[in-house]
Structures are given as C-alpha cells and as structure tokens.
Amino acid sequence: MDRSYLSQCDADSIQLQQLLQTALLSVRSPSVSARDHGSGHTEILNLACGPCREAGALVASFQNEAGISRRSIRITGADIRAAEIEEARSRAAAFKEGGVESEFIVFDCSRLNRLTQLDKAFDFVFLRHQNYWNAPQLWARIFEQGLSRLKEGGILGITSYFDREHDLAIKALKRAGASLLLTVRNPHSRKLPTPGKSVDRHLALFGIVDEAKPEPGKTLITPSTTCSQSPSVPLS
C-alpha cells in the first residue's frame, strides 16, 4: 500500500482522536466518566469497522477522557467483508502488547441480534463514515442494532463524509430512539477529490432517549468550535 496514503490515514486518525476526546469530555457519559482506574473493562463496539484504522484513536480518546487504563479497554469490531477483518486482526497485533484486548468478527452488522457470541453490552458504539444515504434501510437497521447494544448511559458515535448524509443519519438515529447529545464539524477534516467530501467531516454522539443526557445547562460543542490540540497517544 502507498506510504503517502498510509501517512494520510495516520494523520486522519490523530485528528479523529482529538475530535472524539473533546466530544467525550463535553457529554461525560456516566458509564465512562464514573469508572475508576481498576474496575471492569470499557467495552467499545466498532460496527462496519473495515480494517479498523481508527482503533488507536478510539483507545487514546478513552484513555484521555477518563484516565482509563489501557489494560481495561476492549474493542470488538464487526464487518461483512472478510478481507477487511483480516487486516483489522493484523493491525490489532500491534496494540495487543499494550494490553488492549480486541476481537474482530465477520458478520452482517444489520443482523447483529443473531450473533449469539456477542451477548454483552457496550459503553461506546462507533460507526465511522456511515453510509446512510446510499442504503437508508440497511443503515437504519445497523443504527438500531448499535443502539440496542448500549449499556445504560452508553454513547453511540458516528462520523460522516458529507453534510447532507450527516443530517440524514441524525434524523434516522432519532427515529430509532436516539437522543442527540452533540454534533460538531471537524475543522481539520482532510478534503477528498469528490466535491463536499472530507474525512470525518462531522462527528455526532447519541444516547438513548431519557437515559444519557448532558448535564442541565451544559454548553455543548457547536459546529464552529475547534478541537483541542492534545497529543495523540500511540498504541505501541
């Protein structure tokens, strides 16, 4: 694979980590922020994860957000494409030595309820570059499956390539019972050749209605807010 492309992907992951870190600090999910340094695991589910190049960003975001030990973070990824999952598994070997546990499964994320081996709930469910407007019925089912896997107080996050696609996905998640906690435009999003398309152009975080709400009167990030420039935490 082209080295310049890989370098761009690494830079994108750093920007995603900074975006997620700032967003998580704003919404302060009880199931994450109240967790102490030594109890249990922080469970992350990455749906339609592809090769999961964002694994490092996810781990670093939760470490920085709540001071969580690397050894208490566990990532589960699912994607219907076997080749992508193989790449994700190979990538996972790089951060296994740091104590991060991971599992990557070849499966249709719109039918996650049929996956008997995945019988736990998650603190954070993530869908990077969801593709709602190309297959709205399929992605509506994936959104529903993701929301159904949240622990009490858990958060679901999405990123989007396009403005309109992001708006449509937010509406679909609300119809599925999600409560929008935050949506933010990424000021450092890398532009792609297609007009109006850029990497992780928008991020939105959701809870379940009447369950995971921000503190009363708390100011959330607005689309004009820039992300903090904290350093990325490497996985190895």
Image (tube, rainbow, N blue to C red):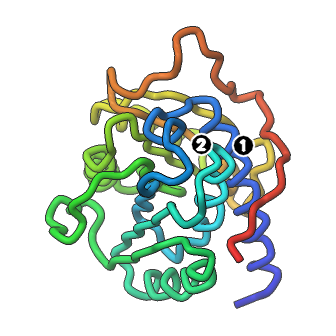
Above or below, comparing residue 185 to residue 124 in the picture: above
172 horizontally vs 70: left or right: left
Tag 2's secondary structure? strand
Q: Amino acid at mark 2?
A: Leu
Q: Which mark is residue 186?
A: 1
Above or below, comparing residue 224 to residue 114 in the picture: above
Residue for point 82% across, 81% down: 4
Nearer the observer, 195 or 162: 162
Coordinates of residue 133 in the picture (x, y in percent): 42, 49
> Mark 1 touching mark 2, by CB under 8 A?
yes
Residue for point 17% across, 59% down: 113
Above or below, comparing residue 143 to residue 103 in the picture: above
Report how many numbered discs are placed on residues in the image.
2
Above or below, comparing residue 16 to residue 172 in the picture: below
Tag 1's secondary structure? loop
Coordinates of residue 95 in the picture (x, y in percent): 61, 78
Q: Which residue is mark 2?
A: 203
**Which comes before the other along the chain, label 1 or label 2?**
1
Find residue 111 and report its image quarter. bottom left
Nearer the observer, 129 or 57: 57
Q: Is residue 167 visible?
A: no
